[in-house]
Each structure stands twice: as C-alpha cells, then as structure tokens.
Image (cartoon, grey):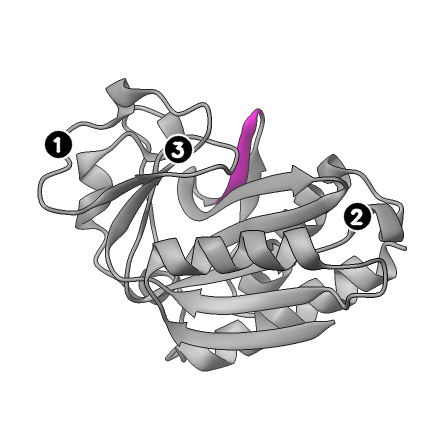
Amino acid sequence: MKVVELGRQAYAPTWQAMKDFTNTRTAKTEDELWVVEHPSIFTQGIAGKPEHELSIGAIPIVKTDRGGQITYHGPGQLVVYCLIDLKRLDIGVKKMVSIVEESVIELLSQYQITAHLETGAPGVYVDHAKIAALGLKVKQGKTYHGLSLNIDMDLTPFAQINPCGYQGLKVTQVKDLADNKINFSNIAKQLTQLLSHNITRAQ
C-alpha cells in the first residue's frame, strides 16, 4: 500500500484528485493512503442538513460526496484519505469503517489515551468527546475520502456547527490528552502504518 504525503493542500483540488484516481484506477492499481492537512474549511456530507450549520462566518463550506454530516478541517488536523479497493480485498464498507476506527484507537493507546466508539455514531471518542471523524464514499467497490484526527489545532470552529450532526457534541484533540510531547509527522506515520497493516491483514 502506497502512502502519499501531500502536505497542506486546498480541499477542493484534493477531492477532485481522489475522484480522478478512483475513476481511472484498474484492478491492478495499488491502494493508496493520502496524508494531508487542509486550510480552514467546513465540509458537508451527502445527506447533510443545513440546520447543523449554526454560524459559519467567514470559513468556506463545501458540499461533498462523502457520507456523514458537517465537519471542520483545519491546520493541525491529520486527514488520511483511504483509496482502497474493497472488492479486491473482499471486505465490505462496514468492515472498512471498523478497521479505520480500531486503527485510530490503537494509535491513541500508544499515547496512553483510552478511546472508544459510540453506538450509532461513527468516529472515535475520548470520554464522549470526538477526536476522530470518519466519512467514506464507495464507488464500484472502491473507497475514497477517509478520516480526520484532531492533533494540535484550533477547535473553536467546531462551535459554529453541530459536529457530524450532533447538537452539543464536544470535541477534543491529542495535544490536550497526551502525557508526552507530540509530533504531527510521527503520528501521521504511525497511523498510516497501522492502517496499512490492518487493511492488508483483513484480506
């Protein structure tokens, strides 16, 4: 599995690149994980409801084709896009979601952070505060979009929305929970290694 480090990139061109990759890949195309940070932006999922946009202000909002409701991306948040051929792996989207969530939980445990899932609410939580959001698009058995993990960012824009469609949902980040000093690049590398291993092992 190829890991592509994109650095900080605007959301819309990255989304288009994911679609282009998915539309042109073949049965032999290697799966990829794209590591990226985005400038401040809200993204609204395919079934997103406008009532979850509370006070957007100057931050742009993009209606996208992933699952889920509205969320926020910004500097200091790790985004990993999962360009995976589920059909080739012979796994379903629910299994893929589970792999992503469990990989994040495994990563956080390495920082002595005890994370958990919430029934009926995709993503990863610590003490019922969301630390990682998840939204995938599946097209002809292939996924794009992926996950976002709050590492060391300004969390205040989350107050302008109902995060992921949940009123009053608290959000948190690794910096505020880890006992030791954290490094964004190290966390990105650790998470992509876990994802690569766990996705490959699911075959």
Comparing marks 1 and 2, which lies closer to the viewer? Answer: 2
- Residue at 19%, 38% (x, y): give it: 159
Residue 104: image location, x then y, percent: 58, 57
Question: Dot 3, how many residues are within 10 Å of its Cα: few (below 14), some (14-19), or many (20+)?
Answer: many
Q: Eyeballing the image, is 158 above or below 166?
A: below
Membership of 45 in magenta stretch: no
Judge from the rendering whether residue 51 lies leftward or rightward of residue 94; answer left or right. Answer: left
The stretch of residues the image draws in magenta is 120-124
Q: CB atoms at circles 1 and 2 under 8 Å apart?
A: no
> Few, some or many C-alpha atoms within 10 Å of disc 2 (few <14, some 14-19, many ≥20)?
many
Q: In the rendered structure, which disc, 3 or 2, sits on the residue that comes first in sequence?
A: 2
How many numbered callouts?
A: 3
Nearer the observer, 116 or 136: 136
**Disc ID at residue 164:** 3
Does residue 139 appear anywhere in the picture?
yes
Mark 1–mark 3 Cα distance, whole angstroms, equals 15 Å
Residue 83 seen in render: no
Q: What amino acid type should be assigned to the residue bearing mark 3?
A: Cys
Residue drawn at x 28%, y 24% is 52
Q: Which residue is mark 2?
A: 86
Q: Which residue is mark 1?
A: 55
Q: Please tell me whether residue 143 is drawn above or below residue 170 in the rendered image.
A: below
Q: Residue at x 87, y 52 (%)?
A: 88
Q: Amino acid at mark 2?
A: Leu
Queried whether the magenta region covers residue 123, the answer comes back as: yes
Q: Overall secondary structure of the magenta stretch?
A: strand
Element at label 1: loop
Nearer-the-camera pick, 7 or 189: 7
Q: CA distance from mark 3 to mark 2?
A: 25 Å
Q: Secondary structure at mark 2?
A: helix
